[in-house]
Image: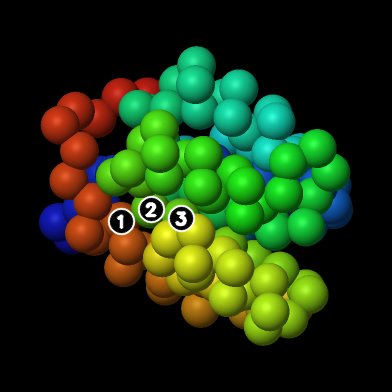
Amino acid sequence: MEKGQSYRSLLIVEDDKAALTNLDKFFTLMGYQVKTAVDGLAALKVLRDKGNNFHLLITDLVMPNISGVALITSVKKEFPDMKIIAVTGYGEQISDLALAAEAEAVFLKPLDLSKLENSVNNLLREYTPNTEKSFK
């Protein structure tokens, strides 16, 4: 196992249930521990309950209740070391907002899952939390 490979827990936030299911299945098959949320409010609840258990957040940017940009801003305040990847189908303007909110990367839909996984892997390689916990 490569250095950093043991830190592989993701929270994926996506309001499109089919897209969420696909991301969950893909990353689970790739060996990641995955939890999912259908919007920003649900994601914040999960993070506040078990935030130290996650190493990376993948979030859609356009969602009901709390936008992905607002979620990124909240997460960076409460969990400043968490790595965040944003995904969107709405183009560069909203991508710029995600980067301004301190997302480490933004991917445009339709997603290239191998490129997304490569980015996740690279970001997690840099991750060095104090402890590793399981949320399952």
Q: Nearer the viewer, residue 8 or 53?
A: 53
Residue 96: percent from the left, percent from the top? 58, 75
Instruction: Bin the neighbour count of mark 3 within 10 Å (Cα to Cα): few under 14, some 14-19, many 20 and up.
Output: many
Q: Residues within 10 Å of mark 1 (few under 14, many from 20)?
A: many
Q: Name above or below for residue 133 compared with residue 21.
A: above
Q: Does 85 appear above or below 67?
A: below
The amino acid type, in three-letter code, at marker 2 is Lys
Numbered label attached to residue 83:
2
**Amino acid type of disc 1?**
Leu
Q: Position of residue 102 (x, y in %)?
A: 43, 60
Give the numbered dot on residue 84. Answer: 3
Q: Nearer the viewer, residue 65 or 86?
A: 65
Callout 2 touching callout 1 (CB < 8 Å): yes
Dot 3 or dot 1: first in sequence order is: 3
Q: Earlier in the sequence, mark 2 or mark 1?
A: 2
Name the outermost residue toward the bottom: 92
**Residue receiving disc 1:** 124
